[in-house]
Image (tube, rainbow, N blue to C red):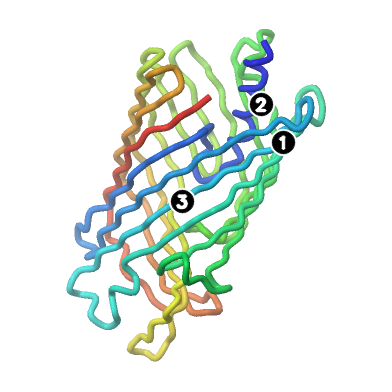
Amino acid sequence: MKRHHFASLVLLLFTITTQAQLSDIARIDYTYLPEGDSNIEYHRFRALFNFPIKLKEDTYLLIGLDYSNIDMTFGDDFSTFEKATLEDFQLLDLNIGYTTKLSKDWRLGFRVTPGVSSNRAIKKLSNRDIVFSSDLVFIKDKKKDPNVRKPYRFIVGVSYSQNRGFPFPLPFISYYRKFAPKWSYNVGVPKTNLQYHYSDRHRIKLYTELDGFSSNIQETIQLDNNETVGSINMSLILSGLQYEFHFLKHFQFFARASVILSNSVNLRNTDNETIGSLGNANRKYFRTGIRLKI
């Protein structure tokens, strides 16, 4: 019973990882956006791990690292600046999370994430490469309550990140319910989905979510209009289908194909004002990876 209680609490803590709303101990994934009509090809490799530490009864600390390498390839249409400056990005975040029980039904989750986001090697950092993220949520979890006929979980709070495609405060809302033996849904921001539990090992998920990244540009770029580029921001709204295969008890393979409903790749000056766009014609999005979950 103690083991299952611990796992449940860790799952709650991991839900405050707002980019994915997932309960990952570790994950490796790869994202690909083909060039299409946009003249921009996008590749992202991401690896993360999280380690929970029990401080006292019903109170836990989470320590983790989240690393991404992003490679963007530009077509011949982009000839007004040095394209190599925008082709390689490094993102590294340190996750520090905390959760404690407030009452019989409610739990507090808090996370701070200092990190770096730059288009050059991490060893050449400056103050402008440093980014910060934070999340504060309140959680009510009835997924495993035997007295609840239709299990559910409700999370509400606020999330802020300088390191994603939407660098401003966002509400964090997540309502999960399993409404039939093989069906469940999750409604909220930044992710909504409808899931079919084909079996204990196979699941299919229809989802809509936010994605993207922001990064500093160490060596500023001068555009033809004499504007100086100091950072880049990519923001996506996706909708698609995901397949999950659960194996070896705690491992999961996943593969997703998405349609990009909204896509912007903007250049910003050192005051974080948009001064140019690199196009928004990408419409296909693919991701695959492996997770280790409790």
Mark nearer the viewer, 2 or 3: 3
| Residue position for label 1 | 99
Q: Residue at x 71, y 30 (%)?
A: 54
Q: CA distance from mark 3 to mark 1?
A: 23 Å
The furthest residue to the front: 123
Question: Is 22 rendered above or below residue 32?
Answer: above
At a point 53% along the width and 47% down the height, the residue shown is 65
In the rendered image, the vertical position of residue 26 relative to residue 265, given as above or below = above
Q: Secondary structure at mark 1?
A: strand
Q: Which residue is mark 3?
A: 67
Residue at disc 3, secondary structure = strand
Residue 225 coordinates in the image, percent (x, y): 37, 89
Quadrant the N terminus occupies: top right
Mark 3: few, some, or many residues within 10 Å (few <14, many ≥20)? Answer: some
The tally of labels here is 3
Contact, mark 2 vs mark 1 (Cβ under 8 Å): yes
| Mark 2, residue position | 9
C-alpha separation, residue under disc 2 versus residue under disc 3:
25 Å
Q: In screen coordinates, is 70 left or right of 107?
A: left
